[in-house]
Amino acid sequence: QVMLSEADLLRQRFNTMSARFEELGSQVNTDIKVHLNEINALGTALADLNNRIAADVGRASGKQLPNDLLDERERLLTKLAELVSVAVVPQENGMTSIFIGKGMPLVLDGVSSKLTTINDEYDPTFLRIGYESASGTSDISNQISGGKLAGSLRFRDEILDPAQQKLGQIAAGLAMEMNALQKSGFDLDGRQGEALFSFKGDEVPVTANLANAGNAVVTARFQDTPDAAQHLDFSDFRLEFVGGSDYTLTRLRDNQVISLTAVAFSTDPNVLNLNFISATDPKITALPGFEISIDISGGGAVAGDRFLTRPTYQAAKKIGVNLGDPRQIAAATNVEVDPVTGKPVFDSSGYAIIIKGPMPGDNRNALLMAQLESKMGLLGGKASFHNAYSQLVAGVGSLTRSGELSATAQKTLLTRAQEAKQNLTGVNLDEEAANLVIFQQSYQAAAQVVSTANSMFDTLIGALR
């Protein structure tokens, strides 16, 4: 009973942490939309200022600049630079062209372009940055740099999503290892064990690309074979149909390609199982912890069809406890062992002697479950579950610290840039005070001249009378 209670508590912790990750992801999406609205508003305002400045410069034939408008444009450019990195190119007519990314014009003379959010081709909750032009909307997410917008994108892509995937890797790996032991053991009533953990909905979600021309239905599930968790990877994967019976599975975190071949099940020829052939990395010798099947009863796939699978992304959210009765814990092993040597006992035909019926007092399989605490079952057999979680926490902490140091360095550079700007455009109080004294003395001298001239005129006029 304690084991089931602890399993449910662990499930709650995984679910809670996953929910927190989703809250952060939702906040990032909100921030991205807010930043884009601000950028678009500033772009429109800057284009309007360009028109007004050019008009004023033209009316004065360039002899007098509209300083108030120029100051306002400078202020808006500073606000825009806080949101995204920009390149500003002054024009001879007083206008400025503003570019973002790799030369994408946000403001060109008196016309502003618009940025918008576009949904990922597989996941509508994953927002990308779109640039609207006469030819349509293009994805410029990879071109965004600097400012709050790039910061939100980097936090999501480099910290938040990988952390959620690694947490799911731990949850799925634990479930795979425990379920494999459960199914290899026998419960208190002598029945073969069932899975301790389960996953709500699709065990491993697979999403078809909207542009697919075929009708194949792809499903995936975690492997329950021994040590399958060692090969489980936290990355997303893209499955692509090449042609014939050939498929490729690309690990998106590093674009590692795995070759697969489709083999029909003997029980259902319309269902194909994708088997591992080879990978470009010699260290990859098996599927990455999950199995893939394809239902071709609706017509099958067409060359170029793509599917995205995210094995661990929502594993911590979907994990649940499958058992409710302590009698279902498969603590026993039904192979008879010699009490002295501890080795299996074989019959005269050379087969291991199998114990039939209930096996009270047999905890040999339970001991194997307990050993999972220290088993190197993740990350290619190099980390235990505790090690993997510690690495996750340490990785997030290191990236956070790196971000703090980078922010401090950038703040120093910003301060120096502002000081350099003030040296060119700011007011020196000492110099202004000295000029004020000069102007005051000049005024007093001029007043004396006027007073003297006034006395002379009075004298001359009096003499003429």
Image (cartoon, rainbow, N blue to C red):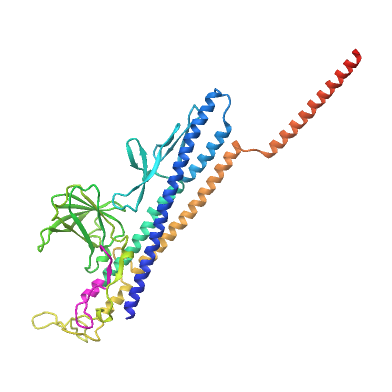
Q: Residue at x 34, y 80 (%)?
A: 2
Q: Residue at x 34, y 61 (%)?
A: 166
Extreme-top residue of the structure: 464
Q: Is residue 359 left or right of residue 297?
A: right
Quarter occupied by residue 3: bottom left
User: Magenta segment, principal secondary structure?
Assistant: loop
User: Is residue 30 within the magenta segment?
Assistant: no
Q: Residue at x 82, y 26 (%)?
A: 448
Quarter occupied by residue 348: bottom left
Q: Is residue 385 above or below residue 239?
A: below
Q: Is residue 16 above or below residue 151?
A: below
The image shows residue 31 at horizontal and vertical percentages of 43, 51
User: Is residue 191 within the magenta segment?
Assistant: yes
Extreme-left residue of the structure: 349
Q: Is residue 61 above or below residue 326?
A: above
Q: Residue at x 48, y 36 (%)?
A: 46
On-image quarter of the N terminus: bottom left
Magenta highlight range: 179-202
For residue 380, say whether it is visible. Answer: yes
The image shows residue 288 at horizontal and vertical percentages of 25, 60
Quarter occupied by residue 456: top right
Q: Is residue 222 above or below residue 110?
A: below
On-image quarter of the C terminus: top right
The image shows residue 356 at horizontal and vertical percentages of 15, 83
The image shows residue 255 at horizontal and vertical percentages of 28, 51
